[in-house]
Amino acid sequence: MAETWWLDGDSALPLSAAEALDLLRGRIAAGLLETWLGSSEGRALALVTNTERAHVTLLDDEDDPGQHVVDPGARGSAEPEAGGCPQARACPQARRSVSPRQ
């Protein structure tokens, strides 16, 4: 059976991809810049945005450090001159995440 996703903490039915996209757009438009989705496999997906860029983290469980989406062309704190890592994909700071329960 395919993994299904829903808004974390919501008892609604699982979301289709189109419904998840509409949910995210609506939350961002309402100023809710952090969204957590839960899955039927016990995983969590976090999306945090400033409306221009987004940080997406996939956690297999509460103790998982998470897998992150990184845009290799993005500029910002990952730049060496800003004290960040020269290659964001290999950066230890890019592997850190915040528990959705904090």
Image: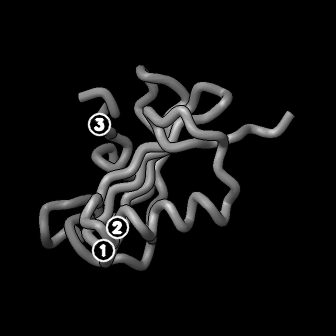
User: How many callouts does the rendering have?
Assistant: 3
**Residue that mark 1 sits on:** 51
Q: Are marks 3 and 2 in contact (CB under 8 Å)?
A: no
Q: Nearer the viewer, mark 1 or mark 2?
A: 2
Q: Compared with residue 26, is residue 52 higher up or lower down, i.e. above or below?
A: below
Q: Where does the image place residue 98, in percent across and percent down from the top left?
A: 29, 36
Helix, strand or loop for disc 3: loop
Q: Are marks 1 and 2 in contact (CB under 8 Å)?
A: yes
* Disc 1 from disc 2: Cα separation: 7 Å
Which amino acid is tagged 2?
Answer: Ile
Q: Nearer the viewer, mark 1 or mark 3?
A: 1
Which amino acid is tagged 3?
Answer: Val
Residue in the picture at 54% in, 67% down: 22
Whether residue 59 sits left or right of residue 47 in the image: it is right
Residue in the picture at 45% in, 27% down: 64
Residue in the picture at 34% in, 50% down: 94
Q: Nearer the viewer, mark 3 or mark 2?
A: 2
Q: Using a 10 Å C-alpha cutoff, classify the residue at mark 2 as few (fewer than 14 neighbours), some (14 to 19) or many (20 or more).
A: some
**Residue that mark 3 sits on:** 98
Quadrant of the image for the N terminus?
A: top right
Q: Where does the image place residue 68, in percent across and percent down from the top left?
A: 46, 50
